[in-house]
Image: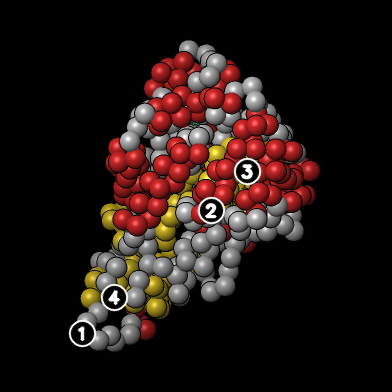
């Protein structure tokens, strides 16, 4: 973004002081705003903001743009996505409608392995073109920071192919992208029945190859019933730790898996899903530096229970929400829909849900110093709404268009 002074902002929403890394418990109840405000962007960062009475004078090389009374919000952060995938899984969508469960489809060799087969026969260029369309949709819907995972390769070569696509997205779009290596998303087709050998491959071949090309910021494991048990998860996390990759793991989607405990033990940046958790998981997360991240889009699509976000907040913990956009369990990257599910299904207030989709989501992908709030020094990336409205209108009128433009 060019150096710009935005004037006549009807309402500037989502303001936080410098140094706030996350919001916990009651802190999530508030979203600060200034009516009739200005905001100055310099060198791609927020330089200052405040009420129009304090409008600064700027040099002639700074653009001045009036927002004519509209509302300006920080862009959404989506800390858990799988937007690099080939084709679709429409047939499984229909199978689910006809009564098969996600686990039954996976057990028949469908699901993630189905996506891996498709990805194997797709060129890197074609995969890039498919992923870039999804990224552009996310941007248009107001998400400017996103984590993207591998995990549909399941061979060294195909995992690298996916991560190179993510690297190309990083190079070509001025948004904030974090890459996560998810070689342990499922046991690759050739290793079915030999899970321990597959785990060895992940640890000894895939992780070193990914690290050599510096392709991943984080490491992920699907630590759940029918997927990777805790002991193998620990092996993978410890192999990745040797290369400085912090975990962000899938845990407790299908069962209480021990994933939260092993994630916290390895100082995960977040533990994700948590559709099934007991109070024990909450206690483990307290006093950790690990964000509980919940994915209501997957609960919605698969008809699973929703994460206990309200209980977490009630217990003084932080909570973040993400889309989990993927072709099998959550085929939408719309963070406004996620914010609405946070309110409608998880019973968060609009303010709590907004904080879960912005500042806490930024923390869940390690970009809290760059994104997630209107704060001096953060990267410029905003949603301009089509009129001034209560924050609650965004989840309440959950499918009424509300974005006029996205600025970045
Ligand atoms: O987060 N749970 C594991 N992975 C994805 C689903 C991936 C797929 O089905 O393609 C998830 O829900
Ligand atoms: Fe996921």
Q: Quadrant of the N terminus?
A: bottom left
Q: Residue at x 37, y 84 (%)?
A: 54
* Lateral position of residue 205 relative to residue 407, left or right: right
For this rendering, which residue is in front, 124 or 85?
124
- Is label 1 in a helix, a strand or a loop? loop
Instruction: Quickly name the residue at label 4.
Output: 3
Q: Secondary structure at mark 2?
A: helix
Regarding residue 386, the answer to whether it shows in the image is no
Task: Say whether mark 1 is within 8 Å of ligand 2.
Answer: no
Q: Is residue 128 left or right of residue 208?
A: left
How much space separates mark 3 and mark 1, taking CA atoms? 56 Å
- The nearer-to-camera label among 4 and 3 is 3
Q: Which residue is mark 2?
A: 211
The x and y percentages for residue 154 are 51, 34
How far, Cα to Cα, is label 4 from label 3? 46 Å
> Can you identify the residue that label 3 sits on?
203
Q: Most extreme residue toward the top, as rendered?
A: 98
């Amino acid at each position: 973004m060019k150096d710009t002074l935005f004037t006549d902002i009807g309402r500037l929403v989502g303001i936080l002081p410098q140094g706030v890394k996350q919001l916990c418990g009651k802190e999530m109840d508030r979203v600060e705003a200034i009516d009739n405000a200005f905001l100055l962007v310099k060198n791609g960062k927020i330089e200052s903001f405040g009420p129009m009475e304090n409008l600064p004078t700027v040099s002639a090389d700074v653009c001045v743009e009036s927002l004519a009374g509209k509302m300006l919000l920080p862009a959404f952060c989506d800390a858990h996505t799988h937007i690099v995938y080939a084709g679709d899984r429409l047939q499984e969508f229909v199978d689910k409608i006809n009564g098969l469960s996600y686990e039954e489809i996976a057990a028949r060799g469908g699901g993630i392995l189905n996506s891996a087969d498709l990805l194997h026969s797709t060129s890197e260029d074609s995969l890039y073109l498919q992923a870039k369309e999804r990224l552009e949709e996310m941007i248009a819907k107001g998400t400017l920071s996103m984590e993207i995972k591998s995990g549909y390769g399941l061979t060294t070569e195909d995992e690298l192919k996916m991560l190179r696509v993510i690297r190309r997205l990083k190079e070509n779009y001025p948004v904030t992208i974090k890459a996560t290596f998810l070689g342990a998303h499922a046991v690759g087709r050739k290793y079915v029945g030999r899970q321990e050998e597959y785990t060895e491959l992940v640890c000894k071949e895939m992780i070193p190859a990914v690290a050599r090309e510096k392709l991943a910021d984080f490491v992920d494991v699907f630590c759940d019933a029918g997927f990777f048990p805790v002991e193998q998860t620990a092996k993978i996390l410890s192999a990745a730790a040797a290369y400085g990759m912090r975990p962000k793991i899938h845990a407790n989607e299908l069962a209480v898996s021990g994933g939260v405990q092993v994630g916290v033990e390895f100082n995960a940046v977040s533990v994700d899903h948590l559709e099934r958790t007991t109070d024990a998981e909450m206690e483990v997360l307290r006093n950790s530096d690990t964000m509980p991240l919940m994915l209501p889009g997957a609960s919605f699509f698969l008809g699973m229970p929703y994460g206990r976000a309200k209980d977490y907040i009630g217990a003084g913990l932080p909570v973040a929400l993400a889309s989990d956009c993927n072709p099998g369990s959550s085929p939408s990257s719309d963070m406004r829909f996620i914010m609405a599910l946070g309110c409608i299904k998880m019973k968060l207030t609009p303010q709590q849900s907004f904080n879960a989709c912005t500042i806490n989501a930024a923390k869940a992908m390690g970009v809290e110093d760059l994104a997630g709030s209107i704060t001096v020094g953060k990267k410029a990336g905003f949603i301009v709404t089509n009129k001034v409205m209560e924050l609650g209108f965004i989840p309440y009128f959950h499918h009424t268009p509300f974005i006029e433009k996205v600025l970045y």
